[in-house]
Image: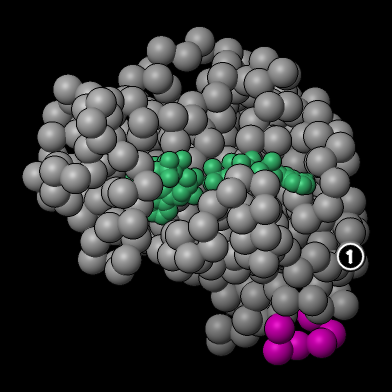
Amino acid sequence: MLMVGLTGGIGAGKSTVTAVLAEAGAVIVDADRIAREIVEPGTPGLAMLVAEFGDDIVGPDGALDRAALAARAFVDAERTAALNAITHPLIGERTAELFGSAPEDAIVVHDMPLLVEGGMTPAYHLVILVDTPAEIRLRRLVEQRGMPEDDARARMSRQATDEARRAEADVLIDNSGDREPVREIVRMLVELRLRPFEHNLRTGTPVVGDRTVVPFRPEWAAEAARATARLRHVLGDVATRIDHVGPTAVDGLDAPDIVDLQVTVPNEATVERALALLTGAGYVRDRSAERPLLHWCDPARPLEVSILAEDDPEHEFALLIAEAIGSDPSARVEYSEILRRADREETREWERTLCEASDS
Ligand SMILES: CC(C)(COP(=O)(O)OP(=O)(O)OC[C@H]1O[C@@H](n2cnc3c(N)ncnc32)[C@H](O)[C@@H]1O)[C@@H](O)C(=O)NCCC(=O)NCCS
Ligand SMILES: Nc1ncnc2c1ncn2[C@@H]1O[C@H](COP(=O)(O)OP(=O)(O)OP(=O)(O)O)[C@@H](O)[C@H]1O
C-alpha cells in the first residue's frame, strides 16, 4: 500500500486534486468527512463538544451547528486546542480503521488539512501539497464558498504557514491558476510516480539511481531532510544519528542525482535491528554492496541508505567528507572527476583517502 498525504491550507483546492486521484482509482480518506462522522447526533464526540463549548452549539434538530462551533473554536489558540483535543483522537481512530481496510495494492490518499500542524508528514511515503497563496484562497473561500472573511482568516491563523508546508512536501501543485492544468499534472503524477512507487513497494523493487553527474541541485538538502525524517519515523531510538553524506551533501558540487544517507546505530547487533525495521518499511537491501546498504522505491528520488555502527571507523569518514571537500578547491575538482567515472567503490576509496589525509 502506498500511503500519500495530501495537504493544503483552507481553500487551497484539495478537492480538485482528490477528484482526479479518485478517478485514477486511489482510495481517498477524507479527514473533513471523518470529522463530521465523529460528531453526528448521539455520538460521544458531540457530547464532549457540548460539555466543552456549551449547549447552544447544537441546533433544534439535535445536530451540531457547525457555524456556532466555529465561531467559538477559532477565536484563539487555546479554544482551537480544546476543539482539537476532543476531535483529533476520534478522527485518528477512524482514520486508522479506514487505512487498515484498504486493499494491499491500493494507493491511499489521506486528504488532511492539518498534516503539517500535526507533525504527521514523515509517516507517509509521499506528501503532496496543494500550494495556493493565502490571498487567493481567501478570495475563493469568500466569493465561491460564501464563507465569512473573518472566519476564513481566523482558521488560517490556526494553521501552518505556506512556507512551513512547503518545507515538508515532496510535491508542490500550484493551484493559483486554472483547474485544467492542475488536473493534467495530477494525472501525470499518478502515472509517472504514484503507480510505479506503489508497484515497487509491493514487489520489493528498488530504485537504483543513475550515476551520471548532473548540475548541483539546491533541493538536495531539503530532500535529504525529508528522507531523514522518514527514516527517523521508522527507526526511532534505534538510530543514534542520521546524516546526509556523499556528493549531494557538498554544497555547490555537481553530482549523481542520488541522495546518500548514513544511519548510525550503537553496535553490530543494532545494525541487524535497523536493517529489519527498514526492510519491513519497504526499503530494499542491496546484496551486492560490501556493507549494509538499502535503496528506496520512489521513482523520482533515488536514495541510498547505509547503516553503520558507531565503533566502525568508516562511519567517521563519511561525516568528514563534505567539510574536507568544501575547504579544498583542488579536492573538489578531483572529486568531480572521480564521480564522473561512476564507480562506487573507487569513489569510496578516494573519499576514505582524503579524509585520512585531512584528519592527520
Ligand atoms: C469547527 C467545525 C465544526 C467547523 O465546521 P465547517 O463545516 O465550517 O468546516 P469543515 O469541517 O468543513 O472544515 C473546513 C476547513 O476548516 C479548516 N479547519 C477545520 N478544523 C480546523 C482546526 N481544528 N484547525 C485549523 N483549521 C481547521 C480546514 O482547513 C478544513 O478543511 C469543524 O471544522 C470541526 O469539527 N473541526 C475540528 C476537526 C478538525 O480538526 N478538522 C480538520 C481536519 S482533521
Ligand atoms: N483553480 C481554481 N480556480 C478557481 N476556483 C477554484 C480553483 N480550485 C478550487 N477552487 C474553488 O476554491 C474553493 C476552495 O477549494 P476546495 O474546496 O477544493 O478547497 P480545499 O482545499 O478542499 O479546502 P478546505 O481545506 O477548506 O476543505 C472552492 O470553492 C473551489 O471551487
Looking at the picture, tell me which residue is in the foreground, 189 or 342: 189
Left or right: where 82 falls relative to 167: left
User: What x and y, as percent, mark residue 239?
Assistant: 36, 53
**Residue at (57, 75) in percent of width and height:** 320
**Residue at position x 24%, y 61% in the image:** 79
Quarter of the image where one finds residue 213: bottom right
The part of the image, by quadrant, that contains residue 198 is top right
Q: Could you tell me residue 272's position as x and y percent?
A: 37, 37
Which quadrant holds the C terminus? bottom right
Q: Is residue 103 left or right of residue 209?
A: left
Report if residue 29 lies within the magenta region.
no
Residue 33 higher or lower than 6, as above or below = above
- Main secondary structure type of the part rendered in magenta: helix
In this picture, which residue range is highlighted in magenta? 326-331
Report whether residue 162 is seen.
yes
Give the camera-side residue of 307 and 224: 224
Give the image location of residue 84, x and y in percent.
27, 50
Task: Give the residue at the far front of this rendering.
Answer: 60
Label 1's element? loop
Check the image and name the residue furthest to the left. 51
Above or below, 330 against 248 in this view is below
Give the residue displayed 67% in from the left and 67% down from the top. Answer: 135
State the residue at coordinates (33%, 20%).
97
Looking at the image, residue 24 lies above or below residue 296:
above
User: Does residue 294 show up?
Assistant: no
Disc count in the image?
A: 1
Q: Amino acid at mark 1?
A: Pro
Q: What percent of the width, then of the height, locates residue 286?
A: 61, 33
Q: Does label 1 point to a residue whose CB lies under 8 Å from ligand 2? A: no
Q: Which residue is disc 1 drawn over? A: 215
